[in-house]
Amino acid sequence: MNFRAIKAIYLFEMARTWRTLLQSIVSPVVSTSLYFVVFGAAIGSRITEVEGVSYGTFIVPGLVMLSVLTQSIANASFGIYFPKFVGTIYEILSAPISYLEIVIGYVGAAATKSIILGLIILATAGLFVPLHIHHPVWMLTFLVLTAVTFSLFGFIIGIWADGFEKLQMIPMLVVTPLTFLGGSFYSVNMLPSGWRTITLLNPVVYLISGFRWSFYEIADVSVTLSIGMTIGFLVACMAIVAWIFKTGYRLKN
Amino acid sequence: MSPIISVKNLSKTYGSGFKALNNINLDINRGEIFALLGPNGAGKTTLISIICGIANPSTGNVAIDGHDIISDYRAARSMIGLVPQELHTDAFESVWATVSFSRGLFGKPKNPAHIEKVLKDLSLWDKKDNKIVTLSGGMKRRVMIAKALSHEPKILFLDEPTAGVDVELRKGMWEVVRALQESGVTIILTTHYIEEAEEMADRIGVINKGEIILVEDKATLMQKLGSKQLTLHLQNKVDAIPSTLAAYNLELSADGREVTYNYDTKGDRTGITSLLSDLRNAGIRISDLDTKQSSLEDIFVSLVRAP
């Protein structure tokens, strides 16, 4: 293992985070606060309780997940797309490092950043509503698993994308709708049974459900299923990344 | 001594079907400056990209000091520093940070003294805290050289190092290259400026249409450069060169009206004076004459134009 190279990539990516502190940390916090104002105060006053939890409190895990998912994808995809775009990727490809080390460096940094962000949003939420975390270890496990999985997914998008539109396309057209429809702002059990069945095809439902369970012990689907689905998605992403590097897809001619 | 780079039967065909390299065999000697000459699109950059791990070979193999570039890529790549043709740099990093990053990427422990030396050698020391985006093109090129030297490579690739670089900077760059060679680094540079190859290289290779068509010591090439041709236009047609002139190895043109004589301007005697008097003695009268020097450029052009 070339640990120095992993460290170099990781620190390089983290330095980018600190340099762009405003857009990487402040803007998600501001938008989350807006969700609280709009959904929590305006709409929440009409929906008093969901499964025994006040609506404002209920949406916290979903909001954290929403940010972690979108930020993981955005960070990781940009992290690898940008060197491809400006050409500095030549140095990564010509360095004595393995593909695994490249992935650990980039995905590790992207995941770190979104975990920090998730915790900041959680703290921000604590200013608006009372929070209680029943299973802190599980909460962190879900947070880390999701951040790593979606950073891997973002890494794949970053390699696949050959233009800035494509970089935006998957997060905008796929991930954001799936997150909104995945029970961030409501319990899947509130839906009519037909819609409920369709919703269960959405992988994000399992992430949010498991994450919310770690807070309030309420879940749309069983926790085991949540963990299973999350790990399944993680393995799928790892398989795709392995294939990308084996074939040199969009990286090497 | 075994070559430091050994390229064997290397071919590269792109997905589009374009054959960029065709059965390349090339050895680079330890410690030499090797210039790879060729017109645009000849395959220079493709060859370098494969050696450095940026592109995959289609067939054939490359060994760096005995280490195969695919099965033993870590050992092979740690020996190589690459300065690509295009100015690929991060914009918002400082010079110091980007050069230190390169060293880490190649798995070397921190060594601020070495980075300092590299930056000073390249006259970048006073810019070390500047963001790269604020630097001029020539400085960015030097930053890329500094990145390549940050991990103390044994082999340095310079792909078109002087494209768009002014004369002053070019001179400075060659000084750095010479000093590197003295410290034992092998240098491979590509260029399409023949004077550059002439000035710098120990050996010169010519590549065209994906094939190496010549590899020669510069000294040998320069000898060819030193030879001149004297063409004598005769007043009257002759059928054959008289036997008294055999020692001059003259060539008679097909129409019998022109005689060519090859001589070395660097030799002690060119033989021109005696040739002219011997011609007069043989009764051959001359109406005109001209001389022509074959330059490296001529050799190059005739090589790459050959069908």
Image (cartoon, coloured by chain):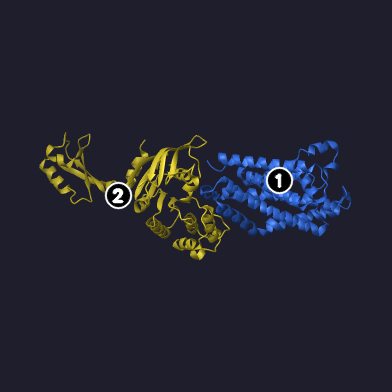
Look at the numbered disc 1 and give the secondary structure of its residue.
Answer: helix
Residue A109 x/y as whole percent:
64, 53
Q: Nearer the viewer, residue B36 or A111?
A: A111
Q: Disc 2: which chain?
A: B
Q: Quadrant of the C terminus of chain B?
A: top left
Q: Nearer the viewer, residue B73 or A27?
A: B73
Residue B33 x/y as whole percent:
37, 51
Identify by letter the chain in yellow: B
Residue tagged by mark 2? Answer: B219
Real-space Cα separation, disc 1 to disc 2, in angstroms: 63 Å
Look at the numbered disc 2 and give the secondary structure of its residue.
Answer: helix
Q: Residue at x 74, y 43 (%)?
A: A227
Q: Residue at x 54, y 42 (%)?
A: A252
Q: Nearer the viewer, residue A225 or B54?
A: A225
Q: Around disc 2, counting alpha carbons within 10 Å, would you say few (fewer than 14), some (14 to 19), or many (20 or more)?
A: some
Residue A209 x/y as whole percent:
79, 45
Q: Which mark is residue A172?
A: 1
**Mark 1 on the same chain as mark 2:** no
Q: Around disc 1, counting alpha carbons within 10 Å, would you say few (fewer than 14), some (14 to 19), or many (20 or more)?
A: few
Q: Which mark is residue B300?
A: none
Q: Residue at x 58, y 52 (%)?
A: A6
The shade of chain A is blue
Disc 2 residue type (three-letter): Ala
> In this rendering, does residue B43 appear at all?
no
Q: Is A138 on the left-hand or right-hand side of B18?
A: right
Task: Report the label total.
Answer: 2
Q: Quadrant of residue B238?
A: top left
Disc 1 residue type (three-letter): Met
